[in-house]
Structures are given as structure tokens and as C-alpha cells.
Image: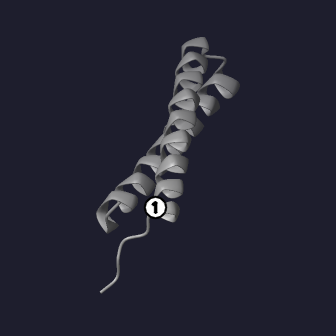
Amino acid sequence: MSDNDWQDAIFELDDLVRMTKLELQTFYEKGNKSAGTRARKNMSDLAKWCQTQRKAVQDKKNNPDPTV
């Protein structure tokens, strides 16, 4: 994973968390059921993101880039 790849992953995480937070606020504060559905989907996407990143970290740990 290059420098830009992990930075992009962090921005993606930030976006997922921000979208989930907004949908949850709408669900709890306004009682919007559709927002609850979107929040659940976002949380599912967040779980997938976590699995992908966990695997990437494990791969990087087990196969470090050669240093010159």
C-alpha cells in the first residue's frame, strides 16, 4: 500500500463516519425511518472497510517493503 493509498483509505473512513453520524442524527432527532436504513447501510459499509483495512495492515506487516 503506497502513501497515497493509506491516506485515501483514511479519507474514506472519515467520509463513512461522517455520513453515518448525519443519518443517525436524522433518525434519532427527527424519527426519519429512511435515515435509519441508510445509517445501517453505512455501518455495514464501515464494517467492510474495516475488514479490508485489517487485511491490508496484516499483509503489510507480514510482507514489509524492502528498504534500500
Q: Nearer the viewer, residue 37 or 33?
A: 37
Q: Quadrant of the N terminus?
A: bottom left
In the picture as drawn, the residue positioned furthest to the top comes out as 33
Identify which residue is drawn at 54% across, 40% down.
51
Image quarter of residue 37 = top right
As drawn, 57 above or below 24: below
Identify which residue is drawn at 38% across, 62% down.
7
Residue 34: image location, x then y, percent = 54, 13
Q: Is residue 24 left or right of residue 17?
A: right
Q: Quadrant of the C terminus?
A: bottom left
Image quarter of residue 3 = bottom left
Residue behind mark 1: 60
As helix, strand or loop, the secondary structure at mark 1 comes to helix
Callout 1: few (<14), some (14-19), or many (20+) C-alpha neighbours within 10 Å? few
Q: Is residue 1 left or right of residue 10?
A: left
Residue 14: image location, x then y, percent = 48, 51
Q: Nearer the viewer, residue 29 or 11?
A: 11
Residue 52: image location, x then y, percent = 48, 42
Q: Please say which color scheme the image uses.
A: one colour
Question: What amino acid type should be assigned to the residue bearing mark 1?
Answer: Lys
As drawn, 10 above or below 20: below
Identify which residue is drawn at 63% across, 33% down.
25
